[in-house]
Amino acid sequence: MKNEQFDEEIQDYLSLYKVDLPDEDEMERSIAAIMSSVPKKKSSLLVWQNGARSLLQNSIRELMHFGALFWVINVLFLILGAITLIDRSADPYLTAFILAPLPFITGTYEIFKSRDEGLVELEMSLKYNTHQVFLSRLVAVGVMNFVLNAALCTLFASFYPQMLVVKLLLCWTIPYVFVTGIAFLFAMNVRSSIASGTLAAVWFAFCFGFLQGEEFQRMVMQMDIVTAIAILLIGVMLWAIGVQRMKKITIGRENYEA
Amino acid sequence: MKLKLENVSKVFGDKKAVDNVTTELTSGVYGFLGANGSGKTTLMRMLAAVSMPTSGVISLNGEDISDMGARYRDVLGYLPQHIGFYKSFSVEKFLQYIASLKGLEKREAKERIAELLEMVNLSESKKVKMGKLSGGMKQRVGIAQALLNDPKVLIVDEPTAGLDPKERIRFRNLLAEIASDRIVLLSTHIVSDIEYIAKEILIMKDGRLIQKDTPQNLMKHIASNVWSVDASDAEIPSYQASYKVGNITRRAEGIDLRIISEKKPAPQAVNVPVNLEDLYLYYFDEEVGA
Ligand SMILES: Nc1ncnc2c1ncn2[C@@H]1O[C@H](COP(=O)(O)OP(=O)(O)OP(=O)(O)O)[C@@H](O)[C@H]1O
Ligand SMILES: [Mg+2]
């Protein structure tokens, strides 16, 4: 009984007060303010999974949209590699070394083509924007390169059972990681149509000199594992720098304002 | 739905391209007028989240669009003023590609693309390579891609540039049709593009938003400033030197000048009904020293 009375009293008392309802703007502003401190619903694992899935999907899509030239050249490299198998006098280690960064070098054209064709402006407004597009093309080219090299190495290893697998691996991972790292940084700053050509020319010139200079060749081919790993690490570092700079270009946006 | 700009500015070096713009857009078509270099593109790029304001906030329904990120881009359709295309892609392939970047499912995209190609009258050319299209056709592909994801916010920067009159009318009708439940912001130099479909017209000058009102109100605002003057050939240069002269019409009995002026330019001048061309002249034609 007493409680009800009390309630009523309070009700009467409260009705004396007029409560100002905030207007719509004020409500929106408070909601916006609160929003930023609301914990994100998704767990980080889920975010990571979703990110990985969309990166994979995007990479596959980008790969399917690469120009015919990319495929033709890469199949050509594979065939070239296979031919050296028939010519027993060729050094498979050298072949692996020379061919290793080529798919990536041809791929630089594809990675940055939206920049050179004037599509970045539009891309940046899409759900999967320039940053994701560049990243997925990078993954597409990188994985393509990896698959081609792996195929070639498997081929070699099965033809020459006496081959040293570790040496073979080093012979292509070094150019694959180190040279592509340089190529990546270079292509980021140059029109891609020029970049691919220049890089290919430089690499071939280097390889030609490499084949001539016996001393240098021996030095590289008989590199000890510590030096190899050091070079690999530098390559990885170049990549890290490249990806970081790419982020700046595509997320920092302003670089593209012309 | 509400797109809100609060004190939005964009500075390039020491140039204020957009100067402290505050306004609000809700569903409907907004026509965006301004002379070359007045800051239309700069503002639209910020609204498309392609560029960040130097200062100020743009929010959709109360949430900062730069915090929304992909969620904002998901409801956005944008046609840049200058847009490139992959030349080796066919029209259809290009649209499919953009659709996938917009996160559309394959089947959904296919239907939508067929529908849009019909809308922009390009069904017949869907297999043609982008590199082989005419300028106006490319522009129509650009319009189609902006609409792929059925955007809630549509930002089109001079979408009618390069379109022939028939296609312009088609585009105008298309916009009028879809604008009922979305925000459409369209910049143009051709006032007839927006004369009948714009809910409001925004006028930019030197980076500032100097007017935002319905076409009727804006025209009413300058109603007493539009004159028709009978003149002879010989008098034309002197009128042009001291007034903003619009249309010059030759008649059997002489020449009729349309003049924009706060004060009566000649004794025989009479006030005539205002149209949007006059509005444009009123705000933007500065060469003459009226
Ligand atoms: N990236 C940039 N760097 C420096 N200045 C810029 C940049 N972008 C635009 N501007 C300047 O900002 C001003 C506004 O340009 P904006 O392109 O927004 O004009 P606009 O109204 O779209 O013109 P138009 O009708 O010619 O398309 C111009 O003076 C232009 O020179
Ligand atoms: Mg512009």
Image (spheres, coloured by chain):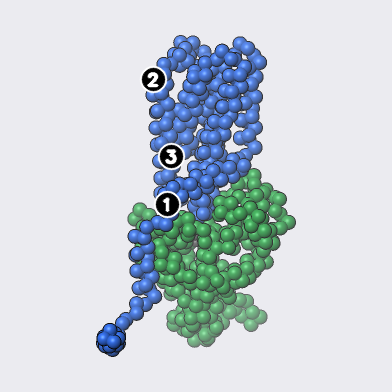
Q: Is residue A2 visible?
A: yes
* Residue at 44 percent of width and 42 percent of height: A246
What residue is pinned by disc 2? A226
* Foreground disc of the pair 3, 2: 2
Percent x, y of residue B93: 65, 49
**Sequence-first disc among 3 and 2:** 2
Q: Nearer the viewer, residue B254 or B172?
A: B172
Instruction: Examine the rendered structure and indicate whether residue A2 appears above or below residue B114.
Output: below
SS category of the residue bearing label 3 = helix
Q: Quadrant of residue B206?
A: bottom left
Question: Which chain can be seen in green?
Answer: B
SS category of the residue bearing label 2 = helix
What residue is pinned by disc 1? A43
* Residue at 47 percent of width and 12 percent of height: A218
Question: Which chain can be seen in blue?
Answer: A
**Sequence-first disc among 3 and 1:** 1
Crowding at mark 2 (Cα within 10 Å: few <14, some 14-19, many 20+): few
Instruction: Examine the rendered structure and indicate whether residue A207 appears above or below residue B23.
Output: above
What residue is pinned by disc 3? A243
Amino acid at circle 2: Val
* Residue at 61 percent of width and 30 percent of height: A74
